[in-house]
Image (cartoon, helix red, strand yellow):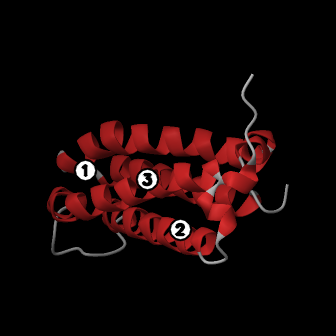
Amino acid sequence: MLVYDPATNPLNNNEWAFPLTEIIHIAGFALSIGTIAIVDLRLLGLGMRRQSAAQLLKDTAPWTLMGLAIMLITGPLIFSSDPLMYLANRGFRFKMGALLIAILYNYTIHRKVAQSNPSQAIGAMVGGLSLALWVSVVFGGLFIAFV
């Protein structure tokens, strides 16, 4: 059986490697969630009223994808620094579940509704749920340090 020793991970051997990776991870999160929130706020009728949700979705899609890519590259790097600790952490497990649901929701229901010029009620429901899912991911990440 192979045993993992966190001391052999480069992120644990340099005082700047882990914090820098985490900063890049959080920047990826901010980029992806920020661009998704722009569309959500439009669906809620709270901003960017001159543009449709469909146009905002089209304009922000490359930025959202870039943020998700950054996040999905740096996340496993951070996880590799101490996988046993992360797997045992309820906050981490919650974050991963919320992340999976949020990504699936974003690229299915959210996208379809945003592209369809929905009624105010449907837009508000879809945008509100999207914001709640992404906030859940962020809170799961924050609670990794506290549980």
Mark 3 highlights which residue? 73
Residue placed at 14% from the left, 61% from the top?
55
Mark 1 highlights which residue? 114
Which residue is more in the foreground, 61 or 78?
78
Mark 2 highlights which residue? 21
| Circle 3 SS class | helix
User: Looking at the picture, which amino acid does disc 3 mark?
Assistant: Ile
**Please, is residue 105 above or below residue 53 in the view?**
above
Q: Is residue 59 left or right of residue 136?
A: left
Q: What crowding class fits label 2: few (fewer than 14 Cα within 10 Å), some (14-19), or many (20 or more)?
A: some
Q: Is residue 145 left or right of residue 47?
A: right
- Image coordinates of residue 136 in percent, x first then y, are 61, 54
Are the residues at dot 2 and dot 1 in contact (C-beta closer than 8 Å)?
A: no
| Circle 2 SS class | helix
User: Looking at the picture, which amino acid does disc 2 mark?
Assistant: Thr
Residue placed at 45% from the left, 70% from the top?
30
